[in-house]
């Protein structure tokens, strides 16, 4: 897989109780059901280097596990504290920051792109100028899904050596703001990473800060996350976190070391560069499943429900791993029905082509599942969906008789 394909793949979707505070989360997981044995068969069955999963219910981690190796071909066991890349699951965090700005009066749901860039009035496409915050968040802006030209421009950002990340995103906005839209804003769904980069640029402009600083200050810090970070989870020269793996043409796995090809380019941040441990991922999922029942209090309950409420149908049969499936799309979240549940899930999957993560919520039951693996592709996608069915059967609100939650 070429570097540009990594970005194209990245286009793809607990509270302050024991599940929301890192130290307590580890203690809660130790006291909860271990999933290690349940995860191991998936490694060989689906050719996964590693796999991690956790279940949160009523604000607590009730099951968690991690199995496999950080690097294919080596025995470097993963742990519950290992940070996995979650790709486009980052979008829900960017959406939450935008919601905070709305509640604080810095932006409004109907704030337009053009109003934030008055100096570009002479070059910006008139339809793009009228695109609203909600349309960017819901992929209904009319901006197209990732094109070859877009991917080339993302990677050309490496050559802009004298710009900070907020300046790089503005540089990309200026380069692309005059292009025609794919559809009239508000009428069609097109999964657009450029839309989230543009959204990130707007947040940066309003805050006079980079998106990276914003997500640390407004998401990672309030939750007390220790493992959450941006870009490759492993440090240069070390295998201290799961490495992403490419699936080569012959089916073999190639571990990608930390470095410029270990994740999507940094300019991509608001669309998907977060890494986080499965326990803290479960904390994030459980907080969302509670829809304001527990702290940290970052936005009102009504705002969380708005973020979870679909605004457009998403008819995408056969979607690539890490992209939304058929259902609906809300604001940084999708809505999908799974065969194993009578009720739909608020969910999202995320991939940078080398990793895959899936987050699934049922807020009516205050229930959530998170899963992550350090390889991308169809087998990884099938593995997570099969595992989701198993975990929901064991621990979900209507579990299989004799198993899991009662």
Image: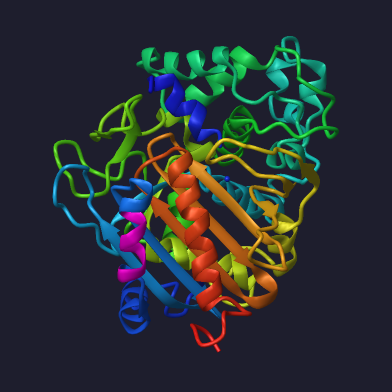
The segment highlighted magenta reads 37-43
284 relative to 25 in the view: left or right? right
Residue 141 lies, in percent from the top left, at 75, 31
Q: Residue at x 39, y 42 (%)?
A: 355
Q: Nearer the viewer, residue 313 or 240?
A: 313
Note whether 360 is above or below 93 in the view shown. below
Q: Residue at x 53, y 48 (%)?
A: 89
Q: Which quarter of the picture shows residue 341?
A: bottom right
Give the dominant element type of the magenta stretch: helix, strand or loop.
helix
Based on the picture, tell me whether residue 363 belongs to the magenta stretch: no
- Quarter occupied by the N terminus: top left
Based on the picture, tell me whether residue 38 belongs to the magenta stretch: yes
Q: Is residue 16 visible?
A: yes
- Quarter occupied by the C terminus: bottom right
Q: Nearer the viewer, residue 63 or 288?
A: 63
101 relative to 223 in the view: left or right? right
Q: Residue at x 44, y 43 (%)?
A: 379
Residue 279 lies, in percent from the top left, at 38, 66
Q: Which quarter of the picture shows residue 173?
A: top right
203 relative to 120 in the view: left or right? left
Residue 233 lies, in percent from the top left, at 30, 45
């Amino acid at each position: 897989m070429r570097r540009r394909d990594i970005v194209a793949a990245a286009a793809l979707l607990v509270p302050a109780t024991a599940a929301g505070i890192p130290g307590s989360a580890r203690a809660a997981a130790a006291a909860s059901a271990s999933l290690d044995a349940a995860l191991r068969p998936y490694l060989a069955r689906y050719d996964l280097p590693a796999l991690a999963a956790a279940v949160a219910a009523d604000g607590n981690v009730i099951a968690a596990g991690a199995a496999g190796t950080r690097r294919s071909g080596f025995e470097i066991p993963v742990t519950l504290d290992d940070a996995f890349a979650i790709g486009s699951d980052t979008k829900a965090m960017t959406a939450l920051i935008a919601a905070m700005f709305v509640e604080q009066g810095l932006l409004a749901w109907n704030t337009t792109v053009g109003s934030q860039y008055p100096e570009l009035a002479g070059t910006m496409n008139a339809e793009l100028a009228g695109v609203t915050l909600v349309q960017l968040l819901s992929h209904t802006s009319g901006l197209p899904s990732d094109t070859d030209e877009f991917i080339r421009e993302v990677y050309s950002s490496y050559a802009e050596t004298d710009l900070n990340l907020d300046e790089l995103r503005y540089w990309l906005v200026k380069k692309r703001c005059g292009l025609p839209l794919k559809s009239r804003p508000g009428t069609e769904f097109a999964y657009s990473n450029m839309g989230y980069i543009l959204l990130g640029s707007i947040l940066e402009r309003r805050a006079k800060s980079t998106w990276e600083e914003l997500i640390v200050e407004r998401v990672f810090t309030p939750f007390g996350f220790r493992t959450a970070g941006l870009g490759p989870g492993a440090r240069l020269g070390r295998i201290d976190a799961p490495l992403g793996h490419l699936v080569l043409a012959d089916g073999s796995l190639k571990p990608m070391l930390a470095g410029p090809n270990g994740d999507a380019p940094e300019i991509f941040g608001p669309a998907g560069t977060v890494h986080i441990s499965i326990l803290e991922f479960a904390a994030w999922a459980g907080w969302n499943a509670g829809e304001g029942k527990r702290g940290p209090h970052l936005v009102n309950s009504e705002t969380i429900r708005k973020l979870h409420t679909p605004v457009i149908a998403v008819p995408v049969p056969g979607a690539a791993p890490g992209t939304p499936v058929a259902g609906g799309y809300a604001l940084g979240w999708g809505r999908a029905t799974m065969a194993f549940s009578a009720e739909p899930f608020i969910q999202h999957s995320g991939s940078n082509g080398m990793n895959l993560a899936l987050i699934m919520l049922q807020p009516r039951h205050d229930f959530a599942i998170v899963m992550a693996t350090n390889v991308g592709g169809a087998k990884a996608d099938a593995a997570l969906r099969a595992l989701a069915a198993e975990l929901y059967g064991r621990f979900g609100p209507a579990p299989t008789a004799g198993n899991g939650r009662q």
